Image (spheres, rainbow, N blue to C red):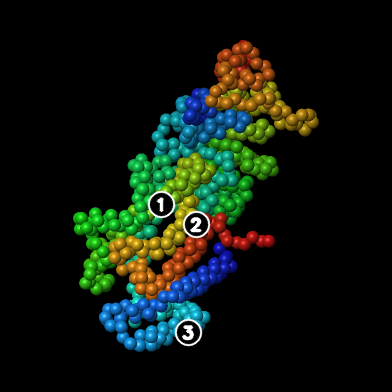
Amino acid sequence: MKADILQVRNLRVYYQTSLGPLKAVDGVTLSLKPGERFGLVGESGSGKSTLALALMRLTKPPGYIEGGQVLLDGLDLIKVSENEIRKVRLAQIALVPQGAMSSLNPVMRIKDQIIDGIKDHLKKMPGSALEERMHELLAKVELKPEMANMFPHELSGGMKQRVCLAIAISLSPKVIIADEPTSALDVVVQRQVMLTLGQVQESLGVSILLVGHDMGLMAQFVERIGVLYAGKLAEVGSVREVFKESLHPYTRLLIACPPSLEEKGQFKGIPGLPPLLLNPPSGCVFHPRCPQTTSRCSVKIPSLKEVYPGRWVACHLYTEVKR
Amino acid sequence: MSLNYLLRRLGLFVVVVWAAVTLIFFLPRLASERNPIVERMGQTAASAGKLGEGVGEMVKAWEAKFGLDQPLWKQYLRYFRDVLHLDFGYSLAYYPTKVIDLIIKALPWTIGLFGVATLISFLLGSLGGALLAWPKAPRFLQYLLPFFLTLSAVPYYLLGLVLLFLFAFTTRIFPLSGGYPVGTVPSLSFPFILEVLRHAVLPGCAMIIAGVGFWALQMRGMMIIGLEEDYIAFAEAKGLKGNRIFFRYALRNVLLPQATSLAITLGQVISGGILVEVVFGYPGLGTLLLKAVSGFDYNLISGIVFIIIIIIAVATLLVDLLYPLLDPRITYQRRVK
């Protein structure tokens, strides 16, 4: 088995508020293998985007990284200098942003926005080589060469997302973080973009951390999945097993949410709302909404434990099942 | 940008100039109870100490010479034709100097001083304001802002008086007034240019210091909003160098409103600099306009105002033509109905 390319250890990202720190990401530990597709799901406000940005140390005030480690190929990204983290971004860990519609500079041509990232990371390259590289990248994400000279407002949403994808792979990074890359697109374009993302991932052998809330999309795309709830991982496992037999009660409810075609039943949701993170519930953060809550749940915080090989869950129901 | 738009925009320019010419012609003539010839004759008579006979005939003769005896519409048509040839007639107060000659003599001083001062203040203020909003900028800038904001609330002619007192009257580092030393003949020689620069320092500084705060404040506000944009966050995720993000992504994208203000200010400065010119005795358009108004010199007033309007109209025309270059999303194409 290959060594993990990305290791996140006990990462904590807080937001400073007048009422004290808000723990948006509270002790997340996970790892990615080279070439692996990992999915991170959770409701709005569960901390998934905060976590994704913190992995590249892009956390903005009032947010701050309280502690923990992000090891990219052994290098702790939380500790390195400002200049070093700048060099790591794009070259080793790249972002496919959430709002593709507005993530490109409206007054710059597409080609310049692809080339400037390469320029700021590599030693001097002749202009012709840069052009050539830029056209290769456009071809990889299935965009026409003429689009190089266009401005972002002349492209559709799907095309803009492809440009962002071309930028993300421009220096063949080790890890790509895709933060809800298709949430602004309709399902048809979403599928096309995800197919391209998949092809690119395979040809480069890059690891992808896909952040999202769409369980269907996750099921089709990723190999392993992590379920985030109130800033903590509730469950981690291979996507097949998690969908077949989810362990955490929250995951089970989450998977039951999308209406299925076979059972034309009622549209189901999870009763209650995610907790306010300023003042989280005692014990397990999910216990007020949990259908299987026990007396222990409101007292003791469950830790993430491996209950079967490769299956991790943070729930008191499983402490005994340990292998 | 389409040819269609260019033609429409030039058409608008012509309309603005026409409206200006018409307004300039009729406005001073509304004060019908004053007669420049009579006032001028009165002055001459007073200085000669004797009121000669036949003053009435003399006034009539002069009026005929200046065409003031003609009906208004004829005067208007003639005026219009002359203005198109940049011929504003003779100055009534400085007869027989032609108005255009007076303007040509004064204009370079005003444009040279205030145009350059405004540009410097615009560049310094915009850059400073942009840096104020930039999180990685040096800290000391934060303390400069209140200082310049306070100064920008002080009218620049007052600031000019203070500068005059400190650096010309008390310490005599710079000359007290004028555009060049009294007694020298304007030429393009090196020592003369040096003198001109020395004379321009104080009035220039008055305008720069008073203007910087305004530009900085406006730029800072726009940068703060601009830095929140998604493309800035993505530029950081791309690991771009700080300089590139600052200039190509942040500053570049908020230039548009700033350029609009610059065009408007450039126009205002030519007329608004009057007081500074008076304070510093600067031989520019402002001083000339003041003399023209106090001497009730129709022709000179209308000539100067016409030139000012042309400058403003040209500045806004340039900015309008510049917009599509600053922001490719602006195409000026008409909506298809």
Q: Label 3 lies in what chain?
A: B
Between circles 2 and 1, the one closer to the viewer is 1
Residue A45 % position (x, y): 58, 31
Quarter of the image with the C terminus of chain B is bottom right
**What amino acid is labelled 3 in the image?**
Gln
In the image, residue A174 above or below residue A232? below
User: Is B284 positioned to the left or the right of A252 in the image?
Assistant: left
In the rendered view, tell whether residue A298 sits above or below residue A201. Answer: above
- Name the mark on residue B70: 3
N-terminal label among 2 and 1: 1
- Three-letter amino acid code at the position of disc 1: Phe
Residue of label 2? B326
Q: Position of residue B40 (x, y in %)?
A: 35, 78
Q: Residue at x 66, y 25 (%)?
A: A272
Residue A164 in the image: state x and y as whole percent: 56, 44
Give residue B9's quadrant in the image.
Answer: bottom right
Q: Nearer the viewer, mark 2 or mark 3?
A: 3
Q: In what element is the residue under mark 2?
A: helix
Q: Are marks 1 and 3 in contact (CB under 8 Å)?
A: no
Provide the secondary structure element on which disc 1 rests. Answer: helix
At label 2, which amino acid type do we have? Answer: Leu
Q: CA distance from mark 2 to mark 1?
A: 22 Å
**Few, some or many residues within 10 Å of mark 2 (<14, 14–19, 20+):** some
Residue denoted by label 1: B214
Q: Nearer the viewer, residue A123 or B251?
A: B251
Which label's residue is closer to the chain start, 1 or 3?
A: 3
Distance of mark 1 from mark 3, alpha carbons? 49 Å
